Each structure stands twice: as structure tokens, then as C-alpha cells.
Image (cartoon, helix red, strand yellow):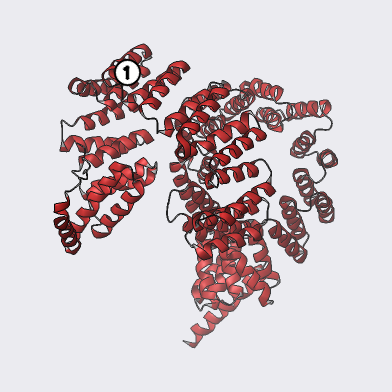
Amino acid sequence: MRTEPVRSRRRPLRHAAAALLALVLAACGSPEERAAEHLARALAHLEAGNDAKALVELKNVLELTPKNAQALLQLGRLHERARRWPEAFAAYEAAVAEDPRLVAAWTRLGELAVLSGDLERAARAGAAIGEIEPENLDGRTLQAAVSLRRGDLATAERLAGEVLARAPGHGNALAVRVGVLNAQKRLPEAKALLAEALDRVPGDASLRLLRIALAEREGAWEEAAADYEQLIALAPANLVYRSALAELYRRRGDDGKAVATLEAALDAGGAAALPLMGGLVDLLLRTQGFPAAEAELQRRLAQHPGEPRLAFLLADLYARTQRPEAAARTLAGIAATAGEAGIAHEARAALAQLALSRGDVAQARSLAEAVLAEDPEHRAANLARGAAALAQGDADEAIRSSRAALRQNPGWPPGLRLLAMAHLRQGEDALAAESLARLLDKAPGDLEAAGLLAGLLVERGELDRAAGVWDRVVAASGAAPPPAALAARAEIRIRQQRWEEAAADIDRLKHSAGQQGAAALLAGRLHLARGEPAAARPFLAEAVRLAPGRIEPLAALAGSFLAAGDPAGALGVVRERVAAAPTDAAAQNLLGGLLVRAGRSGEAEAAFRHALELRPGWAAPARALARLLLARGDAAGADAVLAAALEQAPKDVDLLLARAGALLAAGRPLPAIAVYERVLAEDPGREVAANNLAALIADHQQDDPARLQRAAELVARFRGSDNPYFLDTLGWVQYRRGDSVLAATYLARAVSRAPAVAQFQYHLGMALARSGRKAEAAAALARALAGEEPYPGRAEAAAALARLRAESATAAVAR
């Protein structure tokens, strides 16, 4: 059952007064009556394709009657048409919540859920339709589609057959039937079924698109192209078909036809076809180079003088091809000549992004602020301001700006990405994961976002959810999943001990171009994880052969000998690499690590020093050598190694962190404080450095109010953290600043997460004592002193506990 749009009718002039009176009465009527008028206008706008006006009318309806199920249904359709999938889901869910018998909303919700792979939601929708209208064909088809996706081909075929018996042209049922035939490897029958259906309804675009998908799967490019040409003939204004045809030609390697298709569409379509220009520029840049892409843009600009969309594309082309000055000139020209404030704002916001790409953070923030002074809701300017703030270490402002950028469209991927990165900078992993999940809802093929989210989930031990992230990426990519997604999913499945599934991913990876070495490495890791080092070794040796310059396969091969209890074998294969490639610094570093493991520290030191000679300033061997020297008690030697490396790489944050640690080990906290300040100058968001610096200030510069203020600013980012070390520092800084009550709150959170850390108990005890909670303080200090663990402040903890016990004894005697 589908809701039919209300069609507008032209009224005769003699009825104008009556119509005007009706409008006046409606304006004065109840909220429900006014909402009905707005809904009628929204439906008319939707039918006419004017989505912007329809959205305004639907918002008016929902302001008057927030629970209007019909308006929510139409809002869902509008979002669906604009490919705003999360918003569409939310609208349909709200519609059925308000009217559980609204079959049209259940139908759209279910069909969208099938397309997104949310089979539980789709099944719920199909069941609901079946209860309301048992004979509803859309509901029956929905159940068939769910059965197909779940692999129950018999049920899918039976249900789809029942629908087609009553409605032979039912598009979705035909799609299910074709899907069943495809799953059964009966492609000729599937194509014959579609051909028969298209003979009956040649104008059915969904059926033709389904036949295109089958043709592409078979590699029948000419058949697919012919169907696209038919679609273009049926709907000449539909740019999606022209773009898809060009993409088909590109994928089959016929770049000339792809370019010709887009150029023909642009020539025929005029200004209306300009959205295709971005695809044409990308294609020309890839196949013919920058001059061809620039020339085509200049030619189109001559045809459409002053067209800002083309000017923005030209600026983007300059920026992508490392021509920032030309990009800046183009954007400045747009801003200067724009007839509309909105276009000028867009150009200045783009200039801000360009400044960010050059590393000019201050200029970027200034440009963004200038736009926001005139238009506080400007999305791109908020994004630029947030990105600049994050680069300056101001994660709070980055979060505020990203949320402002998301106000108009909560699913905007760039805003969600910035929000996720800001939460990560704050240590708010759960909020970051939420933003990344929303980003992947909008862009399921975003490998960077998928990698970040899966990594967070792996760190939290949620391996099933992490694998699910890559499941979605692989599903969204169709027949050619990205090798990086297959490799990442295989790694997780190895950790889950889901051996067969991991092996299947590795096999698919092996058949991807250029991925044989990666597949061999993963196969070896699979056998190692199963406790089969001997079986792993041939795969790892093959990975080494295929990628002789990479250290990961060699390290894994050495690991296979270690797993078999053969450290000599591990040293042997690494020494072979060192002999064959004496200038391989990574091999020398690996050799050093194996020698440390074997207890041969003198040889290890020589290997690490050789690695540093080959690659001066490399953090890995410098840090390893420093650890080796510190273990011998040679703090001065460790500091000298790190200082020498920093002369070669003065901004290497890992080296700076290692040097700060060496200075602390040598009992030199004040120089360590200076080094941590250097770390934060290079990377303001480095949380470990912020935490350690604040802790050192609290313990060694606690009498300097300005330095305590600096510490307070550093730890403010940890207020929402779950990390007990960060919470402890946050609480201890508050204690040093005199706020014992607030300090005790944070310190109690730290202790609840890590009760065995004696120093946390000491800090909590001191804060509780100063807050007057002496019994609790004594208990915490007793726990702090229960073991033999040394830590700064242990003597103070003992003195404070003795004082509290003496006070308690005195009070008892007085009573």
C-alpha cells in the first residue's frame, strides 16, 4: 500500500476569492488543519521534484504536529532521495512508532534495511506488514528478500513466486527471483527472466539496472553499456545514468569512451550537466594529466563565464596537483567577484582549508573566523576552524566547531571525521567510536575511518565488532573488496581463532593484483597463531622472497624459529639478510633485538649502533640502545645516544619522549620537564607527554602558581577520560592547586580503575585527608604502603598515615 501524492489543480478565476478565504480560514484554524495544508504543499513539491521547498513544508508540519506519521514518512522519502540514509532510517522508525499500522513506512523501512544489510530490522518490518495486511505483496517480497540475504533460497523463491503469480511485473519480487537464480549459478535463466519482464515494461529502470548488474558480473560490458544507453534515452536529464556509463567504460579500460560520454553529456546538458564536470576532471587528470584537465575546465569556463562551480573545481585541481598559489589566486578571485555572500564565504572557507594544507594554522583559523563572523552556521568554515584548533591542540574547540558543522546535516562525513579525531585527542575513545560508526553509515567504503574504528574496538577487546566493521566495508565494495579490508579482517579473525574465515580472506587476497606477498605473510601468521611454526615457515619465506626490502616478513620468519624454540635459527635467517644487504638498517635493528633476547648485550649494542650509523636519527634503534644502556645503569650513555639522534631528527616526538624517560631514570626531572615541553610544541595532542609533564610539574614545580596553571591546562583534556593514569594526574594537579574535594573525585575514579597502583592510593589518601575524610584517607594510605613498591611520595604517605593514626588515637583517649 503506497500513499499517493496530492496533485495540485489549477482553479478557475471565479473561485479565487473562495480559495483565498479558505487559506485565511486555514491560517486561523487548528494546528492539525494548518499541518494538513503544509503537508499537501509538501507532497506537491515532492512530486514536482522541489525537495528544498518540500523540506521546509515538512518541517512546518512537524513543528505544528510533531507526531504526524504521514509527515515523518514523507520526510524519510525525502532523505532517502538525497541518500541521507541514517536520517531516512530515523524518520521511518519515528513514523511507525507514531502509527504502527502505517504500511508504507514499514515498507520503506524494510526495503532500505535490506539494501543496507540490516536484516534484523528488515525482518521486523516484513513481519509487521504481514500482521497488518497478510496479503500485501510488498511485505511478502520483503520477507523473500530477507530470506535470500540469509541464504534460505527455497523460502525466497517460494515467496517471490507467490508475488509474481499475482503481479508478474512486481520489480522487487523479480529482483529476488533473479537473486535466487544468480545464487544458484543459473545466470542464463536470470537474464531470460529479466528480458521477459523488460519486454512487458521496457521503461522499468530498476529492472534494467538489475540486468546491468548481471551483465557486469559476467563481464558482458557491451550489454551493460547498451542498457545504460536505453536508460539515458528514457531519461535524458538523469545524470546518474551518464555518469555510471562513463564509469563502466573506465573500469573496462576504455578511457576514451568514458571521456567522450561525459563530454557529450556536458555539451548536451548545458549548465544542468555541470555536476558531471568533477568526474570528467578526475578522469582527464588520471589519464591525460594536468594540462588536459586544466584546459577542459578553462574551456567550460569560457562557455559559462563566472560559473562558480567550475571555478571551485579549477581551484581544487590546482590544490590537488601541488599548485597552492594558483589555487589561492582562483579562490581569492571567486571571493572578490562573487555576486552572492554565500559563494564568497565558500571561497574564503576553502582558502582556510588551503592554508591548513600548507601548515599555516593561524591563517586558516583567521580566515574561518572571518566567515563565521558573518555566517556562524557556515559548515565549511566551522570545519576549518575546528581542524585548525585541533592542529593547535585545542580539542575542546575542535569538538565545538565540528558539532556546529554537523548541525545542518548530522551525517556529513568531514564533520564526523573531525569530531572523531577530536574525541580521540581527548582520550574519549567511546565518543570517537560513535562518530566513526556514524561516518561509516554514510561512507561505508571509507578505509581510514574503518581502520580507526576497528583499531579502537580491537584495543577494547571487542573483536567481533571490529570484524563487523570490515564486514561492512567488504559488503559495500561488491565483487572487488579492497585488499586492505581483506587483510585487516583476516588479522582480526586470526586473533579470534576463526581459522577458516581467516583462510578464506587470505585466499581472496592472494588473488588480488600485487597482494601475493601480503597473503603469504598472513598465511604464515595464521599458522603461527595455530601453534604451527613449521607450517608457517614456507609461507613466511615466500613473503620474504616477494618483498625482500620489507622487514615485517623477515621478522615473522624469525618469529617462527623462536616459536619452535630455535633462537639460533632466528638469528641465522636475520644474519643472512644482514650479510646479503649490509646497508639494511632495519635488519640490523632486528638483529639487535634478537641478540638482546639471547642475552648477548655487547653484540646487540654493536648492531643497534650500526643501524644508527646507517640511518642516523632513527628512533627505533636509538630507543632500543638507550634501554639497553639504562639496564646497565649507564644513564649518561643512554642520554648521549638519544641526544645524538635528536641532532639528526630534532622534532622526532618518539625520540623526545625516550629522552625524557632517560632523564627521569637518571633522576633529572627538571630537564625532563623541558623535553616534554618540546614534545608538546611539536605535537600538542600527545597525551602521554601532557600527562607526564603535568605530573612532573605537580611534584617538582608545585610552588609556582604559573606552572600549576600550565599543568591544569594540560590535564583539562582528561576530564572525560577512562585512563586511570590520566585521571590520577588530573586529580593530583587539582590537589596541588588546593581543590581537595574535586581532586578526591578524580582520584577515586583512578583508584576504581586501577586499585593495585600504590601511588594512586597515596594521592587519594592525601586528598581525602585534606578534605577531612580522615578514616577513608587512612585506609587509602594503608593500601598505598601495603606493598614494597617504591614511588615518589612514599615517605610522605607513611608520615601522613602515622599522623592520622596518632590523631585518631588522641581522639580516642579524649573520648
Classify residue 402 as left or right of residue 679. Answer: left
Query: Nearest the camera: 560 or 708?
Result: 708
Quadrant (top left, top right, bottom left, bottom right) of the N terminus: top left
Residue 531 in the image, given as x and y percentages of width and height: 58, 27
Q: Residues within 10 Å of mark 1 (few under 14, many from 20)?
A: many
Q: Is residue 295 above or below residue 22?
A: above
* Residue most extreme to the front: 13
Q: Is residue 42 above or below residue 692?
A: above
Q: Quadrant of residue 712?
A: bottom right
* Residue most extreme to the bottom: 814
Q: Is residue 627 above or below residue 594?
A: below
Q: Quadrant of residue 807?
A: bottom right
Q: Residue at x 65, y 51 (%)?
A: 328
- Per the image, the residue denoted by label 1 is 194
Classify residue 260 as left or right of residue 564. Answer: left
Query: Nearest the camera: 351 or 496?
Result: 351
Residue at disc 1, secondary structure: helix
> Which kind of residue does numbered mark 1 sit on?
Leu
Query: Nearest the camera: 632 or 178?
Result: 178
